[in-house]
Image (spheres, helix red, strand yellow):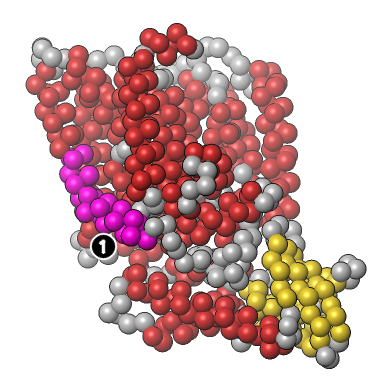
Amino acid sequence: MLDRIQSHWRLCAIAFVLSVGLLVFHGLTGTPEGNSYKYNLPWYEAFRNGFWAGDLYPRYTPELWYGLGGVDFYFYGPLPFWFTAMVGEASCAGCGTGTVFSIGGAWLIILSGITFFAFARRFFDVPWAGFGAILYAVLPYHYVADWFDRQAIGEIAAVAILPLVALAVTRLIADRKGGFLFALSIAALSLSHLPSTLIVGHLLAALLIWALYRQTSWSERLETGARFGIWGALGIGLSAIYWVPALGLLSTVSPDMLTTDYYDATRWLLFDGMPEISPETSAFVKACLALVVVIAAGSTWLLRATPAQPGLQLWIIGPSVFTFYLLSVLSYPIWDLWILNRIQFPWRTLIVSDLSVALGATVIAKSLVEARTGPLAIPVRLIAIAATGVLLVAYAIQIPRVVETIENGLGKHGTYKVVGTPEYVPPAFLQPALTRFRSVVTDEHDSEERFDLFFAEMRTSVAAAERALQTDAPGAILTRHRHDRVQLEVNLEHDATVRLPLAAWPHWRAETGDGRALSIGTDAALGLVTVSLPQGNSIVELSIVETQPQHIGSTISRISLILLLLGAAFGRYLLNLGAEKPLATSPR
């Protein structure tokens, strides 16, 4: 290992300097005020507090919504917040929330370069794999849009894991190995971002169909299908602890908050002749798509004239065609009728095309260096110039937005409203604030003003909930603990039904100090949990029960973990996964 580092010390030095530079840059600028700034910082603060208080998976976080509490992490992927809570804190202990979260984001970008390097080594030697890794880490969609504009931390984590998925798929097809890595990377992808997992799942299905078509016998096809099915199912099963509750409990919150034209996938398709929802976003997406087309076409043409590692063309062409098709109007029926419409924005498919762009750019750069003379010299230079030009255009389109988000983030100094996301609020509590919001908002309000108005109405609802408790039980003390627990201490002059400042979610339970269960109700006017108590002193423990989807998900994850370990230990004897010879393919 040390010998390899010493033999490539220049690349290691470049990677080290760039990584340190990125960490310093993120540390100095803090978290930019991208679209999800308003959610990411309160989410991170609440998740980190629960995690370091001993709640390894803090689904309920008492700080959100101005102290009312939120169930957001029943639904949002935990992996990027686990990662940031550990690596970000270790990198800048004692720093402010905005700084630590930003450094955690930098580490995810660095991680994406590392994982791509591992994947690219399948096709290139170390220096060129390093070149591709550096480029992959800072591609326009992956870094500029996802971090500065959208601040989609879950998608950034997914892009960091995606090269490991690609490496595992390549090994499964070509080497009959890689099942353990495939299962773990699929699990990590699912724990990071469900929309990205859905996109990648469709890409993998297409690639698997192509691989099966290329194989020459039905026995080989059956074995390959079984290998993908078994290891993939174990990966999905490992992450069931998250996605089963996230999907199974969705009806208890307010996903219909997102049923507007902005979240209609068909409205974002390109080349349909329809008015664009956001011309700025569409211009950037078109530039990214042009980058995909230029690099995929140019690198594919170059690979026809030069020898290449098996599978390289597949990973350049496959994700590129997949992305182009799903961004164009040709895919309208899919976005209109198929489950992919749940991811809302077709341009999210650019995450998989980043693999193609980085691989193809590496092919072009390598050819540019090697073909200084001869018949390929001029074509290679033209391809390189075209690819560089489109890349710079994509960056240039986003520069004003990058500057804006950095300046706004610096101006806020990492401050934020202690809120959550509206779609994860139980509908009974959300509705009063939503009704008031709709009565005051106008078309003249921009998006930020609309958010501020809505958050103000939610704060009004929280204040009304706190007043309701004191009205029903003067002097009552409500103490919120970690691990989904709340304690109420009251001294009532007569029997009463007490309204609690807890959103009416159906999975709260209440019991007395001696373990006697109490009946819980809902206040329809305010959307709050209610509990009927007798005259005198009462101490009530409230907690969120383990829901049936949680129990099912946890059970599936435990079983999958056991099977995965058994598969890793005895996989050589199962489905012949340890065979050395590659699968035969037809010359088609």
Is residue 385 shown left or right of residue 99? left
Quarter occupied by the C terminus: top left
Relative to 281, does residue 505 appear above or below in the rendering?
below
- Rendering quarter of residue 547: bottom right
Disc 1: which residue: 278
Relative to 541, does residue 45 appear above or below in the rendering?
above
**Secondary element at image label 1:** loop
* Range covered by the magenta-colored residues: 390-412
Relative to 345, does residue 515 appear above or below in the rendering?
below
Relative to 371, does residue 423 appear above or below in the rendering?
below
Is residue 404 shown left or right of residue 179? left
- Rendering quarter of residue 369: top left
Task: Pick whichever, 539 or 518, lies toward us.
Answer: 539
Is residue 111 shown left or right of residue 146? right
Task: Pick whichever, 555 or 2, lies toward us.
Answer: 2
Query: Residue at the location (67% across, 51% down)?
Result: 53
Q: Is residue 367 visible?
A: yes
Q: Is residue 229 visible?
A: no
Residue 381, given in percent of the width and then of the height, sits at 12, 24
* Magenta stretch: includes residue 400: yes
Query: Residue at the location (66% across, 47% down)?
Result: 56
* Magenta stretch: includes residue 533: no
Query: Residue at the location (47% across, 52% down)?
Result: 96
Magenta span main SS: helix
Amino acid, disc 1: Ser
Residue 355, given in percent of the width and then of the height, sits at 36, 34
Residue 581, given in percent of the width and then of the height, sits at 53, 11
Residue 87, given in percent of the width and then of the height, sits at 52, 39
Which residue lies most toward the front here?
A: 94
Label 1 Cα neighbours within 10 Å, binned few <14 / some 14-19 / many ≥20: few
Query: Residue at the location (61% across, 20% down)?
Result: 577
Task: Pick whichever, 89 or 39, lies toward us.
Answer: 89
